């Protein structure tokens, strides 16, 4: 990811205002509305057809629905490895906090396959929202970018094209909610919080109540000076958990005293699909008992660097880039980051593609190479091609371990690119400072306003 970003977003061009204006313009374009509604409509239709013909659609959405039904029927959520209302082809444990079962309650009113269609439809709309907010959060260079001349049209194109990314299509086919959770965080951090909304932080708290990983965005808000938003996020999360101690006290107690520490319910940590440091170390050490502890240690060592990079972007007004640093750090240090959790590739690719026209012929190949590398990784489905399952990952050759860590290599490549660019720029600043006339603070930041 390039460091060039330009100046802070102008007050009259903040994401919330741009988003509202886009919705207003969209309401007057029936063709655009029809195009935007195609994928969600197809998802719902597929869900109805799946119900009529008994297709196996949405393994994870079936678990969500079963969790909601179990809660509504006052049955235990965590007593066994399956739930009674799960279909025979989706017999999996409910691994989410009890508040998630409450938030999944609307799915209980639909048949299993239709519930998948609803989740998929909302996911497509959430994907479009993420793309649009990302575009609105991009810095505006003088003269603008041709790519962003028509944000609404580009949003529609990206939303369709991004269905080709493995994390995206896998999320949708499984009936997962990763895109929806990402949209909640993006909308909260880049729109509501930036607008000083009284609702700032609430969506982050809701996302964390469904899956615990979004809790990392609470310290993100805190470090970036959004103390009230961080407090609202934490309060929303804690409030939902407290509510569950009232509604389903036995489930709440069991989850927070036992289930939350039981990684075995989530799945084998060494599976190729687990693209986290924990998954990598479990694979390369042949499930050594200390591997998960070592992964936590590596994550702790990386934390100061991640915070420093995130704050460097934030202080330059690069709030989108700061958010991406936190998101990819979370993917690295989470005990489990299945490949479909890496939907954060969506805003990252938007950033990389938007940066391509802003380069000189001398450095163009670097940005094209980086953007191409990221796109190829998330389109290639390399994790599906490698031998996996039945502990085959423990017997990979060296080159297979490299390819089997493709998603992990993305933040490594981005960090290396940033490091090289910053060191090169610092050397240029030192050379200018030694030249007659010295160097100004503006030169230190670079002619384009980047760090």
Image (cartoon, helix red, strand yellow):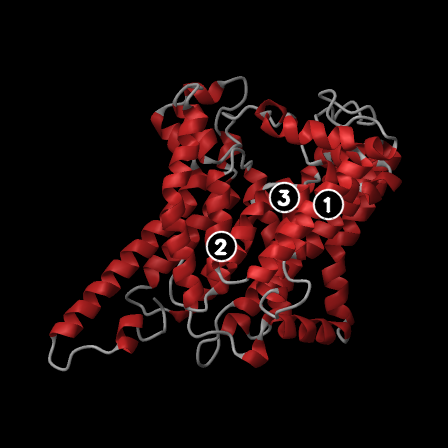
Q: Which residue is mark 3?
A: 169
Q: Is residue 7 above or below residue 282?
A: below
Q: Find the distance from the CA under tag 3 to the CA under tag 2.
A: 21 Å
Q: Position of residue 204 (x, y in %)?
A: 63, 53
Label 2 or label 1, whichever comes before in sequence order:
1
Q: Quadrant of residue 198?
A: bottom right
Callout 3 touching callout 1 (CB < 8 Å): no
Label 2 sits on a secondary structure element that is helix
Say whether residue 413 is visible: yes
Instruction: Judge from the rendering whether residue 175 lies leftward or rightward of residue 291; answer left or right.
Output: right
Q: Which residue is mark 2?
A: 324
Say whether residue 94 is visible: no
Of circles 3 and 2, the one toward us is 2
Label 3 sits on a secondary structure element that is helix
Label 1 sits on a secondary structure element that is helix
Q: Find the distance from the CA under tag 3 to the CA under tag 1.
A: 30 Å
Q: Which mark is residue 240?
A: 1
Q: Which residue corresponds to the image point at 75% horizontal and 56% vertical from the top-left?
A: 38
């Amino acid at each position: 990811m390039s460091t060039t970003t330009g100046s802070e977003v102008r007050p009259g061009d903040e994401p919330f205002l741009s988003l509202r204006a886009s919705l207003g313009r969209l309401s007057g374009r029936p063709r655009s509305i029809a195009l935007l509604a195609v994928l969600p409509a197809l998802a719902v239709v597929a869900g109805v057809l799946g119900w009529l013909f008994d297709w196996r659609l949405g393994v994870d959405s079936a678990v969500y629905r079963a969790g909601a039904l179990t809660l509504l029927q006052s049955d235990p959520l965590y007593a066994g490895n399956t739930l009674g209302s799960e279909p025979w082809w989706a017999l999996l444990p409910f691994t989410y906090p009890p508040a998630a079962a409450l938030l999944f309650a609307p799915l209980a009113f639909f048949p299993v396959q239709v519930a998948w269609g609803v989740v998929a439809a909302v996911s497509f709309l959430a994907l479009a929202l993420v793309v649009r907010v990302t575009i609105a959060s991009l810095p505006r260079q003088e003269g603008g970018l041709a790519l962003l001349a028509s944000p609404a049209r580009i949003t529609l194109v990206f939303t369709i094209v991004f269905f080709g990314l493995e994390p995206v299509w896998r999320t949708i086919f499984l009936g997962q909610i990763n895109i929806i959770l990402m949209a909640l965080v993006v909308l909260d951090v880049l729109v509501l919080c930036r607008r000083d909304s009284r609702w700032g932080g609430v969506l982050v708290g809701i996302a964390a109540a469904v899956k615990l990983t979004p809790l990392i965005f609470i310290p993100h808000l805190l470090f970036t000076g959004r103390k009230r938003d961080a407090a609202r996020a934490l309060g929303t999360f804690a409030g939902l958990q407290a509510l569950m101690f009232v509604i389903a006290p036995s489930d709440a107690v069991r989850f927070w005293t036992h289930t939350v520490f039981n990684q075995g319910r989530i799945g084998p940590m060494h599976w190729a699909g687990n693209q986290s440091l924990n998954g990598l170390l479990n694979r390369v050490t042949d499930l050594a008992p200390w591997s998960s502890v070592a992964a936590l240690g590596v994550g702790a060592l990386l934390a100061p660097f991640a915070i420093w990079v995130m704050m460097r972007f934030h202080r330059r007004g690069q709030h989108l880039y700061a958010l991406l640093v936190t998101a990819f750090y979370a993917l690295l240090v989470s005990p489990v980051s299945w490949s479909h959790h890496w939907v954060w590739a969506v805003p990252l690719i938007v950033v990389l593609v938007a940066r391509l026209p802003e380069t000189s012929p001398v450095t163009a190949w670097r940005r094209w190479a980086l953007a191409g590398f990221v796109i190829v990784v998330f389109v290639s489905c390399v994790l599906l091609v490698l031998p996996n399952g039945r502990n085959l990952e423990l017997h990979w050759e060296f080159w297979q371990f490299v390819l089997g860590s493709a998603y992990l290599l993305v933040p490594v490549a981005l960090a290396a690119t940033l490091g090289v660019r910053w060191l090169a720029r610092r050397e240029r600043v030192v050379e200018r400072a030694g030249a007659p006339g010295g160097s100004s603070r503006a030169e230190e930041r670079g002619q384009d306003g980047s760090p």
